[in-house]
Image: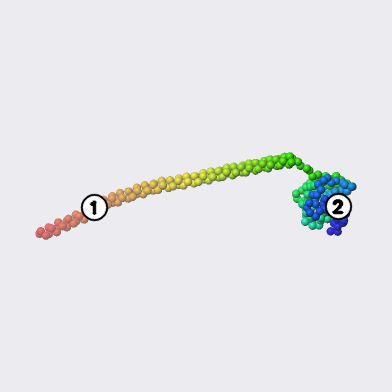
Amino acid sequence: MEGIGVEETMLASDISEGFSSGDDEGLLAEPTIRGVRNGALPPFVNKLYNTVCNKETDSIISWVPNLNVSDGAKSFAIWNIDEFINNVLPLMSKSNNIDSFITQLHNYGFKKMSWDCLEYAHEWFIEGKPHLLKNIKRRRKQTISESEKLHREIKELESASKEQDNELNEFKAYVDNTISTQKRVLQTMARAIKSTIDHHHQVRTMHGIENNNNATQNSALVGQQSHKTSVLGESSFAPSCEIQAKDKSAKNTTRNNQSTT
């Protein structure tokens, strides 16, 4: 990292201002406007521009190429956050706190351009045009009156209340939709159960009718068989008994006659 060491020597004169303390508060110190002073740029802006232009650290932080712009890139990105924190940021500040660095970017009006990486841009921060850097100034710390604070708080409360109302309405619509869906499911289940019960009753009724018909047919068959049996008894067994009785009577008569003789 010899190239980075050269940059550190170049920017050493700027370390005493703003972005120089070892704690987080160093980045937020002196909330007055900082522009060109005694022909010098704000230290943070000067260090940032030189760091982004340093070809030795292009794999860590560099300009973002823009094919639609012919006069230089208009944004820069941090490609490797860990390397930036450990090897580059300490050369720009005594603190290696990335949150403080990002706060400084916001203080000087840089805007985040992408959520995929730490990409930032400023209308006066352009590749190859360092003379425009003098237009970058630190934002003034606004003094807010009590009435303005109260007014903002009221607006925030109103906004929060609207958000809660919207959430409640969405939740109510969700509950109503869920209940309606459950009712339709229950109605469908009730119809299916009723249809099953009705079908079961119909099957039982049909079986009952068939059983009655079978019982009636069985009774008729039994009656017919009884009638045939009685007819057979009368036609076959009765004459036989009469013949046997006549035979016995003739035998008895013969015996009596013989005894008398």
Secondary structure at numbered mark 2? helix
Q: What amino acid is at disc 1?
A: Pro
**Distance of label 1 from label 2 (alpha carbons):** 150 Å
Q: On residue 8, which mark appears?
A: none
For disc 2, the neighbor class at 10 Å (few under 14, some 14 to 19, many from 20) is many
What residue is rendered at 82% in x and 53% in y?
Answer: 20
Horizontal side, residue 209 vs residue 59: left or right: left
Q: Closer to the N terminus: mark 1 or mark 2?
A: 2
In this view, the residue in front, 180 or 29, is 29
- Note whether residue 9 is visible: yes
Horizontal side, residue 28 vs residue 232: left or right: right
Labelled pair 1, 2 in contact (Cβ < 8 Å): no
Secondary structure at numbered mark 1? helix
Viewport quadrant of the N terminus? bottom right
In this view, the residue in front, 107 or 72, is 107
Q: Position of residue 161 (x, y in %)?
A: 67, 41
Figure quadrant of residue 185: top right
Viewport quadrant of the C terminus? bottom left
Q: Position of residue 189 (x, y in %)?
A: 53, 46
- Note whether residue 71 is visible: no
What residue is rendered at 19% in x and 54% in y?
Answer: 246
Q: What amino acid is at disc 2?
A: Asp
Quickly name the residue at label 1: 239
Quickly name the residue at label 2: 14
What residue is rendered at 78% in x and 52% in y?
Answer: 24
For disc 1, the neighbor class at 10 Å (few under 14, some 14 to 19, many from 20) is few
